Amino acid sequence: MEPLSHQVTRLLQAWSEGEAGALDRLTPLVYQELHRLARRYMAQERAGHTLQTTALVNEAYLELVDSVHADWQNRAHFFAVCAHVMRRILVDWARSRQVAKRGGGTRLIGLEEALVVADEPDPGLVALDDALQALAELDPRKARVVELRFFGGLTNLETAAVLTISEETVQRDWTFAKSWLRRELTTEKTYGV
């Protein structure tokens, strides 16, 4: 029997090529991992968040289904895109919630705090997203490494494969980016909407 990662990659490529039924066969193979990614994101949100884990998976899935012409390289690339989509959904939700609140300023958090599963409200996610966007303007690859490692849960090896760089470069970028983000998140800057 073919390993799961190879089966997922093969089905992703078949889906990209428009093969009928490929998506139907792919969905049960990736659902559990999508749910794990969503759980990881939702664990960082406040208790009683109106967007639930399954709803986040479903929302991301609907967006992915619309990208039928995506050129999926492999399983790691697919889950990296999924992580990005989920992050964007949560950040958009958090930003809309802040706009609705009077004086909806964000609370600054440290990177270490952001990397720990917590019951904190979503403004920290917005601050982290703003800091990541600033990093992307300076060095897009380093921002992508953070997105893949932290948000996507990919290993150094998987991140290297997605970005077509060496594992050592991933590790250097990850170390630098964590330090840079920590500094950005602890400065007196306001990451408002």
Image: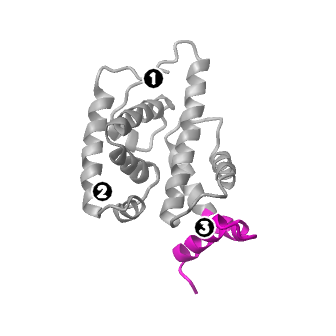
| Amino acid type, callout 2 | Val
Please tell me in which quadrant of the rendered image residue 101 appears.
Answer: top right
Q: Main secondary structure of the magenta part?
A: helix
Q: Which mark is residue 106?
A: 1
Q: Residue at x 37, y 51 (%)?
A: 145
**Which residue is denoted by mark 2 in the rendering?**
170
Q: Secondary structure at mark 2?
A: helix
The residues tagged by marks 3 and 2 sit, at their Cα atoms, a distance apart of: 25 Å
**Which residue is denoted by mark 3 in the rendering?**
12
Residue 116 on image: x %, y %: 39, 44
The residues tagged by marks 1 and 3 sit, at their Cα atoms, a distance apart of: 38 Å
Q: Which residues are magenta?
A: 1-30
In the image: residue 134, left or right of residue 180: right
The residues tagged by marks 2 and 1 sit, at their Cα atoms, a distance apart of: 30 Å
Q: Secondary structure at mark 1?
A: loop
Q: Residues within 10 Å of mark 1 (few under 14, many from 20)?
A: some
